[in-house]
Amino acid sequence: MSKDSKPPRDLSAEDILEAKRVARVRLIDALYAADRDSLELAGQYVKAALRGNGSILRPKRFSSLGNKI
């Protein structure tokens, strides 16, 4: 989605459910494509965030944007 475009407001329930299904499938595909070390590291971040003693890190590709905003 481009910066100028706005999300459509007239989506049907079926359209929303389909978008959620596609997003879920993409997440599952990414999970299976990830290597074990990356999954372990992600698990550690999630556990720390749930315990409340760690921050939730930004994805690496967006980390450089923090200084520009």
Image (cartoon, helix red, strand yellow):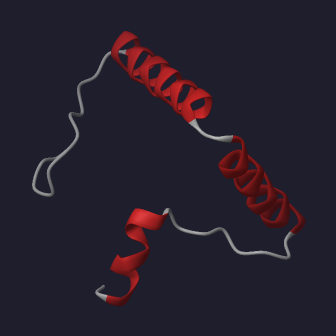
Residue shown at 36%/89% (left/top)? 67
Question: In this rendering, would 69 be left or right of 24?
Answer: left
Question: In this rendering, would 64 be left or right of 52?
Answer: left
Residue shown at 40%/14% (left/top)? 18
Q: Nearer the viewer, residue 57 or 8?
A: 57
Which picture quadrant has residue 4? Answer: bottom left
Name the spot of residue 58 as percent of width and height, x first. 53, 67
Number of numbered discs: 0
Residue shown at 55%/31% (left/top)? 33
Q: Is residue 69 above or below residue 48?
A: below
Q: Quadrant of the C terminus?
A: bottom left
Name the spot of residue 51 as percent of width and height, x first. 89, 65
Q: Residue most toward the top?
A: 14
Q: Quadrant of the N terminus?
A: top left
Residue shown at 83%/66% (left/top)? 48
Q: Residue most toward the left?
A: 4
Which picture quadrant has residue 7? Answer: top left
Q: Residue most toward the bottom?
A: 67
Which picture quadrant has residue 41? Answer: bottom right
Name the spot of residue 38 as percent of width and height, x first. 66, 50
Question: In this rendering, would 12 be left or right of 55?
Answer: left
Q: Nearer the viewer, residue 9 or 68?
A: 68
Q: Is residue 50 above or below residue 57?
A: above
Question: In this rendering, would 11 be left or right of 43?
Answer: left
Q: Is residue 23 above or below residue 53?
A: above
